[in-house]
Amino acid sequence: MSDSLLSHRIKNMPVSQTLAMAAKARELKEAGRDIISLSLGEPDFHVPDFIKKAAIQAINDNYNSYSPINGYLDLRQSICKKFKRDNGLIYKPEQIVVSTGAKQALANAALVLLNPGDEVLLPAPYWVSYSAIVTLAEAKYIEIPTTIDTDFKITPKQLEDAITPKTKLIIFNSPNNPSGMVYSEKEYRALAKVLEKYPDIYIISDEIYEYLNFEALSFSFAAIESMYDRTITINGVSKAFAMTGWRMGYIGAPEWIAKACTKIQGQITSGANCISQRATIAALEAPVSSIQYMIDEFNKRRLLILDLLKNIKGFKTTKPLGAFYVLPDVSYYFGKTIKGQKINNAGDFSLLLLEKVNVATVTGEAFGAPNCIRISYSASQENIKEAMRRISELLNS
């Protein structure tokens, strides 16, 4: 069969670079290579026991039937409590939709809001799936570029300059994947002042790394009064609770958007996994202190990797405040030849590290940061030390 029979949607959609690098690293590891993977954003912790017990109880209680499309009512009530407790946001259960991971929640929101030709603003760097989801919705994404010198943040002027009559949506992500930067309340309010002039532009606020914020409290964009009725707040339990494989995300949104997301989800997946939903109630109703040990360990790893990166020639870094990534600028090496390999771009550099020293990272090109590579420090301190030693030995020689 020929690829010509495939739809334009799938042909226009790029492969996820993070998953592609992870797959390549797995193949090499299976072939006997001593690969250290710093490519995936996946915690290396086990799921906390109290969450496991809730899942086991759900199995014993015979939760095995189709769940409501938008999620169990008591889970949606727990999400409302969480939003109020942690974000100062007041939602009704009718404004909550539970999905199979935050990625589905993002796709739902994009598909119900976007029409062909609409424009979506993506402050760069951004998570790789944002652009792919926009493309799937047959809209156009517009990057708002930043650099390491501006701490990977956009300014109100940049936002104003990027807006056109076709702008329908902007996606914010703080703490940010891939840079680890965090917008302050003051910075978000300054951006909101611009958006107040354009009432037909909607906002997706991706807050999946909310609890992994090491130097300040996270601030929700929807907490700005003028933005509440225009913001879809997206969150989930994958990162902070180490529940990546449990596939559980959710939104808080204006009720008409929540109803539309329920409608589209009803035709694609229906309700999310029933056991994961019961476990998520336990996760969200527990105090944040119950996962503080993981947050503290990620902070130790952050400080460790920043200290080690200082000693690697040609790496320019900023200090990430959240998530578990660092995004060094490696453009110093562009145009150079290392160990017989010509480095033309960040993709070449990332492949160099994988092929020469068995360290998997991800090219920043996939995130709208072409001068950078993304390094995840969700690995153990031992693996971080060894990976940085290998990279240093390669480059400093």
Image (cartoon, grey):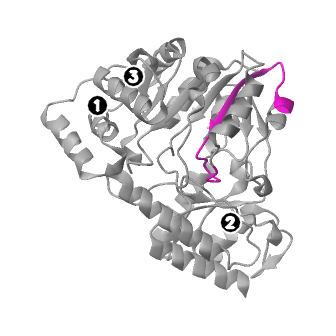
Question: Type of residue at label 1?
Answer: Cys
Q: Position of residue 290 (x, y in %)?
A: 31, 50
Name the secondary structure under disc 1: helix
Name the secondary structure under disc 3: loop
Classify 10 Å Cα crowding around label 3: few (below 14), some (14-19), many (20 and above): some
Question: Type of residue at label 2?
Answer: Ser
Q: Which quadrant is the N terminus positioned in? A: top right
Q: Where is residue 77 in the image (x, y as percent from the top left)?
A: 33, 23
CB contact under 8 Å: marks 3 and 2: no
Classify 10 Å Cα crowding around label 2: few (below 14), some (14-19), many (20 and above): many
* Residue denoted by label 1: 274
Residue range corresponding to the magenta coloring:
160-181
Q: Where 257 falls versus 75 (above or below)?
A: above
Q: Which of 26 and 1 is in front in this view?
A: 26
Using the numbered discs, state the Cα–Cα distance from disc 2 to disc 1 in whole angstroms.
Answer: 39 Å
In the rendered structure, which disc, 2 or 1, sits on the residue that comes first in sequence?
Answer: 1
* Residue denoted by label 3: 270
Using the numbered discs, state the Cα–Cα distance from disc 3 to disc 2 in whole angstroms.
Answer: 39 Å
The quarter of the picture where residue 144 lies is top right
CB contact under 8 Å: marks 2 and 1: no
Q: Position of 80 compared to 308: left or right? A: left
Q: Position of 83 compared to 3: left or right? A: left
Residue 19 seen: yes
The residue lying at 72 percent from left, 68 percent from top is 349
The residue lying at 64 percent from left, 78 percent from top is 391
Q: Where is residue 206 in the image (x, y as percent from the top left)?
A: 57, 36
Q: Where 141 falls versus 73 (above or below)?
A: below
In the rendered structure, which disc, 3 or 2, sits on the residue that comes first in sequence?
Answer: 3
Indicate whether residue 61 is drawn in magenta: no
The residue lying at 32 percent from left, 37 percent from top is 280
Q: Which of 48 and 215 is in front in this view?
A: 215
* Residue denoted by label 2: 350
